[in-house]
Image (cartoon, rainbow, N blue to C red):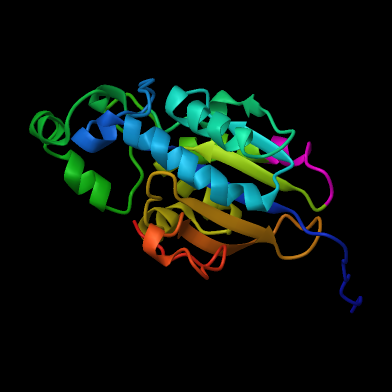
Amino acid sequence: MSPAVVTSGPIRRLVVVRHGVTDHNARGIWQGHLDSPLSEDGLAQAEEAARELAAYEPDLIVSSDLQRARVTAEIIAAACPGQQVRIDPRLREIHVGQWQGLERAEMTERFPDAPTLLSGTEDFRRGVDGETYGELADRMHAACTDLFGDLPEGGTLFLITHGVSARALTGDLLGLDREASWGILEGLGNCHWAEMRETAPGTDRWRLVGWNLRTPPVDSRQGARFGAQTPRG
């Protein structure tokens, strides 16, 4: 039996950030590919998160082209000296087809099977003619693989994306099957993030360091340790 190959050197880090809140989020409207802007609260969330995320010292910041993610990314980049935002449309949210633009109550009235499908274990096409979770995971994983090629050894990549997109990508990188990632991973809150690190340099095997990390509440910041925030959905 050949001896195991031991790798050494700096490891890469990936931080996946969900955009700030929008009025559509607050109203429970299915956004999908709608290009909805951040609300005032969402802008404030992004400013708060940027101060915390700057401590990661990212080497590359890449965002979905939808403005709720892009503006969040621009605010984060402004807090990171020398960084600009690269845009990649593959980081968009899942396309929800005919659900897009509907409030939850209206969606379930028009598509009464949707709650059962969403709580089940089988993949399905969202909103009749939207994407499947598997299709979303494929495009997210392909984008991430390409972007890792532009990352320096031991570098840190920021992806600014959306709730379902973040869940699909994280599950794939952790080696979860897609049914498991949909069922196990709770959605990221607005301007919350996940941190992953390679298990060893160049292995493309990833370990989840933190999920639903966030800016600590104002009354708990004194003495707070970065990266150990209380998860909140």
Q: Is residue 146 above or below residue 188?
A: above
**Quadrant location of the N terminus in the rendered image:** bottom right
Please identify the residue farthest to the left as the structure is shown: 109
Tally the numbered discs.
0
211, 116: nearer the viewer: 211
- Rendering quarter of residue 4: bottom right
Q: Is residue 51 above or below residue 210?
A: above
Q: Is residue 50 magenta?
A: no
Q: Residue at x 41, y 58 (%)?
A: 185
161, 205: nearer the viewer: 161
Residue 111 lies, in percent from the top left, at: 14, 32
Q: Residue at x 24, y 23 (%)?
A: 101
Residue 125 showing in the rendered view: no
Q: Which residues are magenta?
A: 145-153
- Rendering quarter of residue 109: top left
Q: Is residue 149 magenta?
A: yes
Residue 16 lies, in percent from the top left, at: 55, 46
Please identify the residue farthest to the right as the structure is shown: 2
Q: Residue at x 65, y 27 (%)?
A: 86
Residue 8 lies, in percent from the top left, at: 88, 66
13, 128: nearer the viewer: 13
In the image, taking residue 59 as reference, residue 117 lies left or right, namely left
In the image, taking residue 109 as reference, residue 121 lies left or right, namely right
Residue 88 lies, in percent from the top left, at: 60, 26
**Quadrant location of the C terminus in the rendered image:** bottom left
Residue 88 showing in the rendered view: yes
